[in-house]
Image (tube, rainbow, N blue to C red):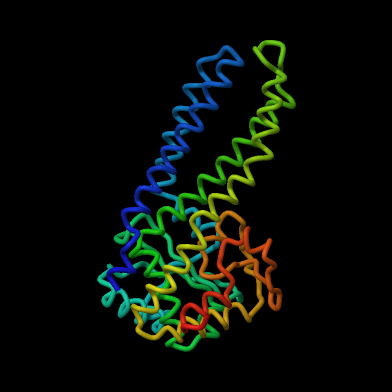
Amino acid sequence: MGENLYTHQDENVRKTWILLSSFFIFVMALGWFFSYLYNSAVILYIAVLFSVGMNIVSYWYSDKIVLSLHKAKLVTREEYFDLYTVTENLSIAAGLPMPKLYVVEDASPNAFATGRDKNHAVVCVTTGLLSILERTELEGVVAHELAHIGNRDILLSTIVVVMVGFVALLSDFFLRGSLFGNRDNNKGGGALLIVGIVLAILTPIAATLIKLAISRKREFLADSSGALLTRYPEGLAKALQKISGAGIPMKTAHNATAHMFISNPFASKGKSPSAFQKMFMTHPPVEERIAALIGKQ
């Protein structure tokens, strides 16, 4: 279990710092460019403050933003005894602190983990998941999420949500500025318009690439690590089969957070992705994940 569950810890920590640093540099570069165009150093100062502020928010509050976005509520042992005891037992087996448990009132079966580290981790499941899974299947799902925590996937995947969202806001802001701003007092009204349009076009593409880069591989790894933790891969395989077979999209499904869930919250029943579609999926096809778990080729 150690070889799989904790193999990518250092790698994910490096990716997190690279992402935060890249965001800082990106906003600083934009601030310098627009301060040059408008002959105003104030814009650069604002960009510096914005970059620092967003990095702080992303590190300390990104998990709270995600939980709020999906209207998740903190629950207790008394409210959800099976969920609590399953998570408690598996946390002990994995050598991890007991995460906080949240539940989303939603008929769609799904789950995700978030938090900045293993000592501030959260496992969140939907009521739909709890209603259709047997205990061994629930153990498989919870073990999968604990693998994300143990492997330190959670901070990286959660920060992506905030970063992508704010970059989208920035692109919209600069596009609006380029269309409605006063170009008489700057050094390049035409350049401003072009930059705004390019940002508006490239932002959703960049967001998709970021999510793809961190999602599919980490799902296979968490499946493998979770199965080793429970010593019963069939439990997770059956859970994935039930989750994908439900075909119920989440009411709070959001493109920015789709990569965090154990299964695509937008997925519909009975649709097999084409080879082209697989290139842009945040999750591996369920059939491939099940085959990997139960040893089929």
Counting labels gives 0
Q: Position of residue 56 (x, y in %)?
A: 40, 41
Q: Is residue 153 left or right of residue 252?
A: left
The correct choice, above or below, for 132 with respect to 105 in the image is below
> Looking at the rendering, which quadrant does residue 131 occupy?
bottom right
Q: Position of residue 215 (x, y in %)?
A: 51, 60
Residue positioned 70% across, 67% down in the render: 274
Q: Is residue 224 left or right of residue 175?
A: left
Closer to the camera in the image, 184 or 36: 36
Q: Position of residue 159 (x, y in %)?
A: 46, 50
> Looking at the rendering, which quadrant does residue 191 occupy?
top right
Q: Quadrant of the N terminus?
A: bottom left
> Looking at the rendering, which quadrant does residue 275 occupy?
bottom right
Q: Position of residue 146 (x, y in %)?
A: 37, 70
Residue positioned 49% across, 60% down in the render: 67
Residue furthest front in the image: 297
The correct choice, above or below, for 109 with respect to 252 in the image is below
Residue furthest right in the image: 179
Residue positioned 63% across, 36% down in the render: 171
Closer to the camera in the image, 93 or 277: 277
